Image (cartoon, grey):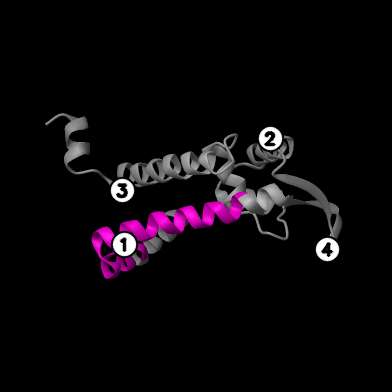
Amino acid sequence: MRRSERKQADPDLGVLSGRTLFGLQKELFATLAEQGHPELRPRHGAVLAYLDEQGSRATDLAAQSGQHKQVIGTLVDELVALGYVERQPDPADRRAKLVVPTAKGLDEMARSDAIVAAIEERHARAVGEEAYAEFKRVYRLVAGRSAQPQ
């Protein structure tokens, strides 16, 4: 059996995770575009998915998303230009900056949460609420182990 056939017949964790991620991103960003946010791309999720409503430091966004600080800085620059976030002084440390969502950013964040919740509800209905809850429990365990150094 060829490798590509094997990956289709018995996909490993990486293939399954990729399919899940790319499928979710495709639906999420298509729906966001329909709802007034057509300029966003999946790469912006490295900031927007982890951004606190009160603001977050770029270093925290980098750590949470697994991206380099420089990548987060570039994405924040793009999101500032698009009107989704702004940089503000951190009240806890005036030398630091917070990335803070604008009204447009807060709208996107609320819509994203609702879209992802609807996707999850659809999956839970398709496979059964109990099975989906167990899948998420186990997937969180696997994802947590994957994030730990070996």
Q: In the rendered image, is residue 125 in sight?
A: yes
Q: Which residues are magenta?
A: 108-136
Task: Determine which residue is flagged by label 3.
Answer: 13
Q: CA distance from mark 2 to mark 4?
A: 25 Å
Badge number at residue 134: none
Quarter of the rendering occupied by the C terminus: bottom left
Q: Residue furthest bottom?
A: 130
Magenta span contains residue 131: yes
User: Mark 4 against mark 1, which lies toward the viewer?
Assistant: 1
Task: Determine which residue is flagged by label 4.
Answer: 92
Residue 13 lies, in percent from the top left, at: 31, 48
Q: CA distance from mark 2 to mark 3?
A: 32 Å
User: Mark 1 against mark 3, which lies toward the viewer?
Assistant: 1
Quarter of the rendering occupied by the N terminus: top left
N-term-proximal mark, 2 vs 3: 3
Q: CA distance from mark 3 to mark 4?
A: 41 Å
N-term-proximal mark, 3 vs 4: 3
| Occupied quadrant, residue 145 | bottom left
Q: CA distance from mark 2 to mark 1?
A: 35 Å
Residue at 52%, 56% in the rendered image? 113
Q: SS for tag 2?
A: helix
Query: Callout 4: few (<14), some (14-19), or many (20+) C-alpha neighbours within 10 Å?
Result: few
N-term-proximal mark, 1 vs 3: 3
Q: Amino acid at mark 2?
A: Glu
Tag 3–tag 4 contact (CB < 8 Å): no
Q: Amino acid at mark 3?
A: Leu
N-term-proximal mark, 2 vs 1: 2
| Occupied quadrant, residue 40 | top right
Task: Determine which residue is flagged by label 1.
Answer: 124
Task: Determine which residue is flagged by label 2.
Answer: 78
The one nearer the camera, 37 or 95, is 37
